[in-house]
Image (cartoon, helix red, strand yellow):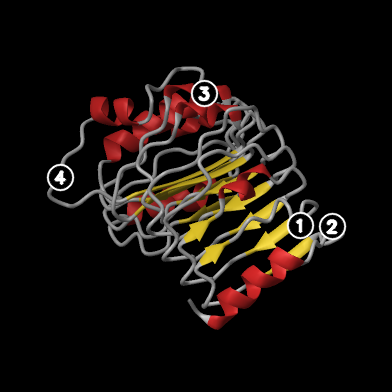
Amino acid sequence: MPQSQVILDKLLEKIRFKSLTYMNFHSCHYIRKLPDLKKTTPNIKELNLCGCKNLMEVHESIGQLDKLEKWDLTDCIELQILPSCLTMKSLKHLSLYRCIKVEKFPNMPQEMEGLKYLNLCGTAIKVLPPSFANLIGLHQLFLGSDFYLGHLPGSIYKLQHLCEIYLYVKFPKDVEIGRQVLCNSYGGFSNNGFRSLNVLFLCFSKNGLEIDFILNSWCPLSLKCLFIRSEDYTLPKSIIRFNKLHSLDIRDCHFIQEIPKLPKCIEKVDASNCFSLNSQSLSKLFLQV
């Protein structure tokens, strides 16, 4: 066991830091296992483990830290074992961004109203537990990766405070995924969607029909910002129905040929690197914006 890990374990074993509220282990490459912190630092509010590239396991007790508000595990590329349950009443921010070996998200047996920000992008999590719906206060959700299609529980529609969703799904070019499959994968869409949704970011390498399906099923007419990255997408004429939309970002949609009539409230359009846009469509766009 690396010396720094031994020192950390002995330090926490012998000393009780009851008044400690902030711990920063950013880029401590020799930490392999985070020990029991509930007994030693029960009042911890912020735990920064970002860049701990050799961290493999987090002790079960971490999921029970009642005072913890921010927990950052970004770029813990060897991390595999998380607490089986999260019962953190005060947690507001949780990032597992680019934890590429994390395959299972913890169960949440109780409602966690405090969690506002959750980033699971770049993980190996394919299926979220049904108890995911207990994150009733969630505002920002980041999901997906370059190498899988994630599955959401049908109960996700209970998260009616979601105002920003960032969905990254990159299908292999030789695979066709039908609308019904996507519907099943994401728990069965409903016409109610997310009523508080203001910002939607969709990164699909292909399958433009599924993007249309998400727009029609998830988004209220009050959607304000729409970001789309796709190789084969064409904006539908129905885009005009989003009568609060003020920002449209379709940069790098290389094969989009035409931009239909946009809502009158539009203030910003980014169509950089949309090489296939014809001059007629560009002229109409200049007249609109």
* Image vertical order of residue 20 relative to residue 61, above or below: below
User: Residue beneath label 4, please?
Assistant: 175
Q: Is there a contact, CB below 8 Å, between mark 4 and mark 3?
A: no
Q: Secondary structure at mark 2?
A: loop
**Which comes before the other along the chain, label 4 or label 3?**
3
Q: Which mark is residue 157?
A: 3
**Which comes before the other along the chain, label 3 or label 1?**
1
Q: Is there a contact, CB below 8 Å, between mark 1 and mark 2?
A: yes
The kind of residue on which mark 3 rests is Tyr
Out of 159 and 103, give the one closest to the viewer.
103
Using a 10 Å C-alpha cutoff, classify the residue at mark 4 as few (fewer than 14 neighbours), some (14 to 19) or many (20 or more). few
Q: Residue at x 67, y 40 (%)?
A: 115
* Image vertical order of residue 29 relative to residue 113, above or below: below
The CA span between labels 4 and 2 is 54 Å
User: Residue beneath label 2, please?
Assistant: 18
The CA span between labels 4 and 3 is 28 Å
Q: Is there a contact, CB below 8 Å, between mark 2 and mark 3?
A: no
Side (left or right) of 95 relative to 147: right
Name the front one of labels 4 and 2: 2
Q: Is there a contact, CB below 8 Å, between mark 1 and mark 4?
A: no
Q: Quadrant of residue 236?
A: top left
Name the front one of labels 2 and 3: 2
Q: Which mark is residue 153?
A: none
Using a 10 Å C-alpha cutoff, classify the residue at mark 2 as few (fewer than 14 neighbours), some (14 to 19) or many (20 or more). few
Using a 10 Å C-alpha cutoff, classify the residue at mark 3 as few (fewer than 14 neighbours), some (14 to 19) or many (20 or more). many
Q: Is residue 27 visible?
A: no
Q: Residue at x 81, y 59 (%)?
A: 21
